[in-house]
Image (tube, rainbow, N blue to C red):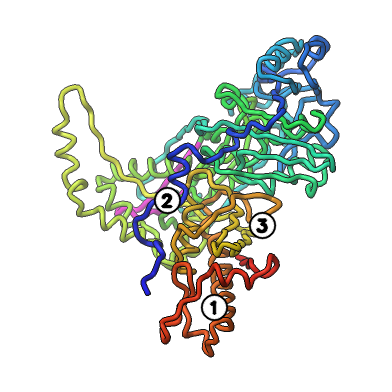
Amino acid sequence: MSSAHKLGSRSPRFDAPAKALGKEIFASDEYPENMVWAGALRAGVPHGLIRSLDTSAARKIPGVVAVLTAEDVPGENRQGFIYWDMPVLCVDKVRHAGDAVALVVAETKEILAEALRAIVLDIEPLPVVDTLDKALASDALQIHDLETGNVLKQATLRKGDAQAALSLCDVVIEETFFTPQQAHCFLETENGTARMDEDGILHMTVSTQAPFRDRFEIGRALGLPPNRLHIIAPFLGGGFGGKDGATVQCLLALAAMHAGGRPVKMWWSREESMLAGYKRHAARMHFRLGAGADGTLRALICDLDYDTGAYAHLGVEIMALGLEHASGPYRVEHLEANGRCIYTNNPVAGAFRGFGVAQVCFAFEGMMDRLAVRLGMDPLELRLKNAIRQGDKNGVGVTMARSTCMVECLAGLQNHPLWLSRNEWVRNAPSFTRRGVGIAAIYNGMGYGRGLADAAVAKIRMTEEGRFRVYNGVSDMGQGNSPTFVQMACEILNQDESLMELVQPDTDRTHPSGSSSAGRTTYTYGKALIEACKAMRDKLLHRAAMVMMVDDVADLELVSGAVFHAASGREFPLVALAVCFTARTGSVSGRR
């Protein structure tokens, strides 16, 4: 019998038809019956003390359901999942222009906008700390009350003696690099709906990368037991790290707690997303790189300053990843990498594709180009000479246990016509046109790394119709992990995709499998799904052996829609086999 799987071959994405036809329901498409709208009043100034907040006029507007301030927050009024320093609603101080100071719930968007305009907010401005130098100045105004001033965290990674080694190098180059904040600009801005049911269960549908973790962040901030929170994460209209952590979640949940059981919708405008959403960390990076006359890298000393904005969010972890990757995918015998994560009154910085690594990759590759010019070497040859190989230790002493394929990748480019003809292509640029050709090599760690268990639990079930339903525990923000999971299940179960169903993350139906981040979902959840599918396959074949009166299970195989016995040519339909399964036995789970 022919195989029905499509892994490794070109095939339409499982999720493509619904998206192309506009049938896929994103969180922003949810408009529950009898819903109300929620919106936040933002500080509008980057730093200041709240003198007064008068909501009386807003409360009198017909159609206003509730006007909430910090006094209405029942829990700790702190968001975060590593550092809890960001208020849901500010009490007496604002630290960036996007800080929320009040929350309005209203019948319509128009009434909501009117009520927000009616709130009178009086803020005493404080000096704005909007640069790293201002934040680090000896007389800098503290954004948070820390003994370390505006430095949230600092750390150093060392290998060997970089200071001594640098003094012995034939050539030393030095440069400072800057990268700005960057907005994710996903098509679907931050949004969600929420409803508190009569049993006190809060049901939420949110555009989020971490629905299971959201329960704990919301619960702590608002004083709710996490097991009273039910969160669904449908396909995201983009995320890229900007939805890894609470955006609308705590505000939306608070609004639902005061909506009398009615559904509440919150959807940030593009302007509000720019103002209050997370950004990539701006960074200042000073590098000193030493090498031998033949181009062999000897020593690196770098100082990395990350602007985490008004609140910590994931700043320390992002700084740590930058330190670990500071020397790029090269052999560097001696390294000293110093990092600081610094508070400013800029927008809150957080996860963004690359998670602190993108900044240092830009800087170190710039150093490699400068070194190549200084030595008169081909920039590709310089990289190839220092490329990290299997068995080497990277800049922070981690052994590359498996092949990095770095040499093979660079060697493949070395004789490529586009590389060999690059100078001619530049020379032949048409009038008023400047051309340039560059090369860069980067690497990035996959997964959470040490200190945090990277695990997933997958579930697959056979339905009464003989179909297979995969319960996906990690959000799909467009990177394509969902169709990949379907392909994997088809491969192992030897089924056609037409027999597959997919459930997106749902804290009541799927299992906790971590966040959709760190390039981890296919590796972690995918591995768990492989184990679950193998268990399902074995279970089906053993049940079929009993029904088909076959002595040896090895004589059976799964084919599309059936179990096949090659010796006799008999098939037993999966839909018939499904009646042998109960709700209890018809699903299996796998762990990674």
Magenta stretch: dominant secondary structure: strand
Looking at the image, is 302 positioned above or below residue 182? below
Looking at the image, is 75 positioned above or below residue 72? below
Instruction: Check if residue 108 falls in the magenta segment.
Output: no
Query: How many residues crowd around disc 1 within 10 Å: few (fewer than 14), some, or many (20 or more)?
Result: many
Q: Earlier in the sequence, mark 3 or mark 2?
A: 2
Give me the C-alpha separation between circle 2 and circle 1.
28 Å
Q: Residue at x 52, y 37 (%)?
A: 237
Q: Earlier in the sequence, mark 2 or mark 1?
A: 2
Give me the C-alpha separation between circle 3 and circle 1.
26 Å
- Say which quarter of the image contains residue 367: top left
Residue corresponding to mark 1: 541
Rendered-image quadrant of the N terminus:
bottom left
- Residue ranking furthest to the bottom: 551
Residue corresponding to mark 2: 13
Q: Secondary structure at mark 2?
A: loop
Q: Secondary structure at mark 3?
A: loop
Residue corresponding to mark 3: 511
- Check disc 2 and give the amino acid type: Arg
> How many numbered circles does the render carry?
3
The image position of residue 207, as x and y in percent, is 60, 38
The image position of residue 500, as x and y in percent, is 51, 58
- Say which quarter of the image contains residue 200: top right
Query: How many residues crowd around disc 3 within 10 Å: few (fewer than 14), some, or many (20 or more)?
Result: many
Q: Earlier in the sequence, mark 3 or mark 1?
A: 3
- Check disc 3 and give the amino acid type: His
Q: Residue at x 58, y 68 (%)?
A: 532
Q: Nearer the viewer, mark 3 or mark 1?
A: 1
Instruction: Check if residue 297 falls in the magenta segment.
Output: yes
The image position of residue 87, as x and y in percent, is 75, 31
